[in-house]
Amino acid sequence: MSRKTDVLTRIAEAFERMNPPAATAPDFDAADAFMWQADPDALVPVTKVSRVALDMLVGINRSRDTLLENTLQFARGFAANNALLWGARGMGKSSLVKAIHAEILTQGHNLKIIELQREDLPSVGRLLGLLRGVPHRFVLFCDDLSFSHDDEHYKSLKAILDGGIEGRPDNVVLYATSNRRHLMPRDMIENERQSAINPSEAVEEKVSLSDRFGLWLGFHPCDQDDYLAMIRGYCDAYGVDISQDDLRAEAIEWQATRGNRSGRVAWQFFCDLAGRRGVAL
């Protein structure tokens, strides 16, 4: 009898692992930022977000102003668009999202940001169920979003944008960053056109995903003046004393060793400079 009981207990435990209990509603007052994790489902509070001040982001004024206005509309309770920030790597796409969230908080609005990993997109329906009807407004943030040829995660993303019978909750908006305008490599699009029975339909299903974002904000490589202005802004903000001539010579040499200019390269040079000058960040 005890052996049968043990077998039934193991079977019951296996079913529980296969069908975990629904996540309980978190304490949204515990933090302004959260990370979503699946299996088991949970919203993990983030007490300190890694970000820079909005006024330190140089060379992206148009994208900054557009996304800030969209986010302000949303935080005030009005309609707003999902946003896709695409373009050159290291040019401040994810930094802009986090900086704008901080700016909205300083203006006294109740806005939460939730980071969602691409690998957890299949669980997004359960996340939306937790957020629907809650008296807070949420920015879902998916960083470095892209899909490969055999990736089906993009179908889950449609539930956040405008698909599904329930639609997107009124208190949720999605901001995603990607190096690719259509969230997939160009060669993948060409392969679909060449191998599919109906090439236009094969491509349309995947490309239409990016069309569901109301805002497309492009980020392009910075020029040398913007690159130097970024570093000067960091020096002024953190109190690193260096002449403009020395900064220019050292920064251009650093950029030459990296083979490109970007906001990320500017920050990496500044970290090295601050360390050599004995300034803690």
Image (cartoon, grey):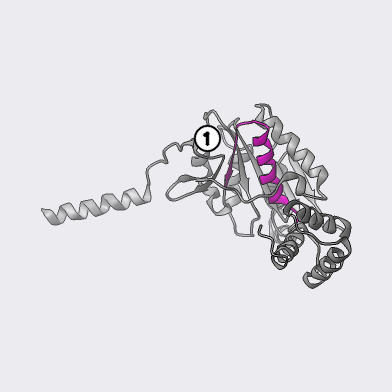
Figure check: 89 above or below 29? below
**Depth order, front residue of 211/144:** 144
In the rendered image, residue 250, in percent from the top left (x then y), is placed at 82, 68
> Is label 1 in a helix, a strand or a loop?
helix
Q: On the picture, is 78 further left or further right than 221?
A: left
Image: 135 above or below 55 = above
Q: Amino acid at mark 1?
A: Leu
- Left or right: where 139 falls relative to 265: left
Image location of residue 179, percent across then percent down: 72, 56
Q: Which residue is mark 1?
A: 131
Q: Measuring 86% from the left and 68% from the top, which residue is drawn there? A: 249
**Left or right of 34, for residue 233:** right
Q: Please report the residue visible at 80 percent of the width from the left and 55 percent of the height from the top.
A: 230
Placement of the C terminus among the 4 image quadrants: bottom right
| Relative depth, front residue between 94 and 149 | 94
From which residue to which does the magenta span run? 91-115
Q: Could you tell me how many numbered marks the image carries?
A: 1
